Amino acid sequence: MTPRIELRPSPHVVKGASVEHIMFHVVLALLPIATFSVWQYGLSALALIVVVTLACIASERLFNRLSGKPSTLSDWSATITGLLLALTLPPSFPLWMGAVASFTAIALGKALFGGIGCNVLNPALVGRAFVQAAFPVAITTWVPAFAPRRFSEFVPTTFTAPLMTPPDIAAWALQAKSVLDGFTGATPLARWKFENVLATPADLLSGAVTASAGETSALLILLCGAYLAARKFMDWRIPVADLGSAALTALVFQMIDPARYPDPLFVLLSGGLMLGAVFMATDMATSPVTPKGVWLYGALIGVVTVMIRYFGGLSEGVMYAILIGNALSPLIDQVTQPKVFGAVKGKKA
Amino acid sequence: MATAPLIPGQKPRSNLEELLEGVWKQNPVFVMVLGMCPTLAVSVSAMNAMSMGLATAFVLVGSSLLVSLMRNLVPKEVRIATYILIIATFVTVVDYAIQAISLALYDALGAFIQLIVVNCIILGRAEAHASKNRPVKAVLNAIGMGAGFTIGLFALGAVREILGAGKLFGVSLFGPDFQPWVVMVLPPGGFFVLGAWLLLFNWLDSRKAAPAKPTESHAHV
């Protein structure tokens, strides 16, 4: 058999990373974080992650069918949306609300724009923003990490009947954690903002704080992000610009008033900044593509995050910062177009 | 003023067509997307939405009748001022009537009762239809448009009240443990629900237009 000879101009190496390939590796990178979350918060976190991810996949399938397009489940994007969404929710979040968030994420965040690659905003964050606005109490109800009986019982709110108010779990949370530990029911950021109590970096790194399911393991997130960046499945400039500008902004504020503003390390390690910077701001469909634009976009998210944390009504601002960054991406791309090679400034080609 | 149909060659519509035009084919909320200000602002509950819709419908019917009757008397140059005066008269009637019937409702609707004066559905009907048609047709068309607007407002108000408060017309549907969707009674909820209804209408429309071919649109959110 004679080998087929193909004559054509470069590039000749055509094997590249496909969408499925990249997305699959993002799922792989998210799994350690999800596992850590389950180890921290137990059965309720596991149930939440499973239900939210399955709900995202089911919604994706539904919209595929309604639009008469072939199934896009195999590209893993719905799975990533589900995993990310679950990791940004409190572990005690009622499952039915999780399902609402998933459906909104896929429907409003993705399907309406035309599916994968066409979305303007990060779908997972659209879902989270919707439930944040719809159920403000449930999404700020936290449970202690490393509760002794986390693998033998669910948080009472997990199995709230659909459409019903979750029960008050303050008493349950106190009893779940020994009283001596002083469970406050607030995230480190909220405690800093509203009670002026600063968590130690050791607590933040070990995950012994109350927080959303997947946002406490800063080191693990960085490791998984480093894996993705090393395999070139992710633009490392975005998290670097995001975290760098957040730290720099925090440093400036700390120099202005050290008594009032926390140190940059606290800003970096608390809340969802790491998870957002590494896994959400880097979403390929919703971030700029120009070399300068990428830095600008990351820096913008970092600054807005710190601004919302310091001066906004909420204690956490990563979600809105990334959504703002997403919305501005097309504009950033437009104003940072690289110069055409050989073009003279001020002269139209 | 001409009483002949607007477009030459277009055959005059029957009375039934005039009546049904606003209810479905040219629904002011879902098809023409007119009068969005009251639509988004007062559709927090089904009751408010229905009252607003009926008040607007009353003004619409009254002003259409009067504009149609006077269509040959009013000089072209001052027609808009005349329409506004006629509409404002009916709005004043509605304003006092609602105040007399229910002060609570009056407070809930707030400035939006007075703002019926500048509702584009009413002015649009006066300019585009009532001033060119005989009173019977003008009134029938106004009734249809008013009904369409009321249906549209009710569709929004019902969804927002059911999700936002767990009630319909103040009657609890899911018991005391219902978790209200706070966003639904806030302004963004109005946009979400309106968008969902528009989506549904357009989807049904596009399916009707091409029944054999699978459509590109998506179901309601």
Image (cartoon, rainbow, N blue to C red):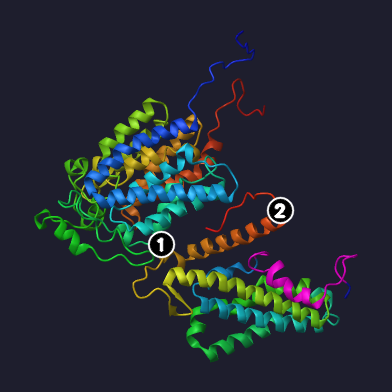
Q: Quadrant of residue B219?
A: bottom right
Q: Looking at the picture, does residue B86 appear above or below residue A40?
A: below
Marking on residue A246? none
Query: Which residue is at a point 61% across and 81% down the rendered structure image?
Result: B54
Label 2 sits on residue? B210
| Amino acid type, mark 2 | Ala
Q: Is residue A212 visible?
A: no
Q: Position of residue B118 (x, y in %)?
A: 65, 74
Q: Nearer the viewer, mark 2 or mark 1?
A: 2
Residue sitting farthest toward the right: B9
On residue A134, the disc is 1
Furthest residue toward bottom? B100
Q: Which image quadrant: the C terminus of chain A?
A: top right
Toward the viewer: B59 or A91? Answer: A91
Vertical placement of residue A15 versus B152, above or below: above
Image quadrant occupied by the N terminus of chain A: top right
Residue B11 in the magenta stretch? The answer is: yes
Q: In the figure, is residue A26 to the left or right of A74?
A: left
Q: Which residue lies at the image location 71% right of the left edge and 53% below the top edge?
A: B210
x, y percent for residue A315: 31, 54
Marks 2, 1 in one chain: no
Q: CA distance from mark 2 to mark 1?
A: 37 Å
The kind of secondary structure element at disc 1 is helix
Q: Which residues are magenta?
A: B5-33
| A312 left or right, relative to A287 | left
Q: Residues within 10 Å of mark 2 (few under 14, many from 20)?
A: few
Percent from the top left, x then y, of residue A253?
29, 45
Q: Is residue A99 above or below residue A87?
A: below
SS assignment for the magenta stretch, majority: loop
Pick the residue in front: B206 or B197: B206
